[in-house]
Image: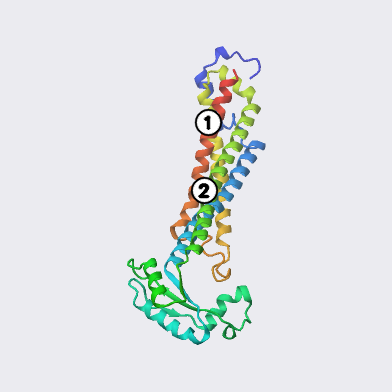
Amino acid sequence: MMGTDFRTLNPRALWQGLMRDGGSGDRIVPPTGITAQLTLFSAGAMAFLAVFALALALATGRLAERWSGELAGSVTVRVSAPLDEQAARTQATMQVLATTPGAGQPRLLPPEEVARLLAPWFGPDMPVDALPVPSLIDLPIVDEDFDVQGLRLRLEAEAPGAVLDDHTEWRRPLVTAANRLRVLGIVSLLLIAAASASMITLAAKAALAANGQVIRVLRLIGARDITIATAFVRRFTKRAAIGATAGTLCGMAGIAMLPGMEAAGGFLTGLGFQGWGWLLPLLIPVVAGAVGFFATRWAALKMLGAVR
């Protein structure tokens, strides 16, 4: 283009020919180079992390509901008494529980089950029969008519030594912890989106700066800033979507390879996508493309407006 008198050229025809040669602005935005690699890598890495953050947010929500439901579905009654009165007080407590409105059939935990419950604290060889271990009764809740406070008063009057535990002290910290983890997962998703927008903005500005001479020529032949910005937006949105798609697929594969409930001993229960939840990660490339679109558009228009 050296020695050309731009005033003798048809600006519209020259611009259309330049865009037609590149197909999607390749003559303005280089298809390879550090900006392309940076955009693809950052979008892929952020999408990979977003899959696990989304899985964490969904899984902790399910765990909170499951823990709360399991603990709220029953209560435990502990009966403590001298050895010669233990059986009689336990029987009296069973009779009270059997006639409690809204409660199911009470079940007296056998010594071997009590030993399993105490094993984490006292070891598997603890002689439960030789120790003054209280009787434990599991009482399922089957109806909304169940009155915890009313049952406590009945036990105090009719079965001295029986203590009702509705698992409130256990349930509250578990549910609180799960809810906080869910909030942490959502915050992580927002931070990942912000980091992606920052990286794409930096890459777009670097591409604009590297093509400053081309942009000046385009302005001489009549190209508007919005038209030049559109070429960058199209290219970087495509790169962000492609990188995010690859990262999302890798993240979903990683989630699928997590050990199952049986292999993990229940520890990783629910730490994955279930059912229709597997479709949610497919939204990540769409969101990444939208982030790339708006971030590049903002960066391009701002930088083009500042450089005249």
The amino acid on which the numbered mark 2 sits, given as a three-letter code, is Ile
Image mark for residue 186: 2
Q: In this orientation, which residue lies closer to the viewer: 186 or 112?
A: 112
Is disc 2 placed on a helix, strand or loop?
A: helix
Residue 33 shows in this picture: no
Q: Name which of mark 1 and mark 2 comes first in the sequence.
A: 2
Is disc 1 placed on a helix, strand or loop?
A: helix
Q: In this orientation, which residue lies closer to the viewer: 51 or 165?
A: 165
Q: What percent of the width, then of the height, locates residue 263? A: 58, 70
Q: In this orientation, which residue lies closer to the viewer: 60 or 270?
A: 60
Quadrant occupied by the N terminus = top right
Image mark for residue 297: 1
Q: What percent of the width, then of the height, locates residue 241? A: 53, 43
Q: In this orientation, which residue lies closer to the viewer: 186 or 138?
A: 138
Q: What percent of the width, then of the height, locates residue 268? A: 56, 64
Tally of numbered tags: 2
Image mark for residue 264: none
Quadrant occupied by the C terminus = top right
Q: Residue at x 50, y 87 (%)?
A: 84
Q: Residue at x 37, y 78 (%)?
A: 96
Mark nearer the viewer, 1 or 2: 2
In the image: residue 208, left or right of residue 167: right
In the image: residue 290, left or right of residue 155: right
Q: What percent of the width, then of the height, locates residue 198? A: 59, 36
Q: Residues within 10 Å of mark 1 (few under 14, many from 20)?
A: many
The image's colouring method is rainbow
How far apart in space, not on screen, are marks 1 and 2 (Cα)?
26 Å
Task: Tell whether label 2 touches label 1 (CB within 8 Å).
Answer: no
The amino acid on which the numbered mark 1 sits, given as a three-letter code, is Arg
Q: Residue at x 47, y 85 (%)?
A: 87
In the image, residue 279 sits, relative to residue 144, either above or below, namely above
The residue lying furthest to the bottom in this view is 84
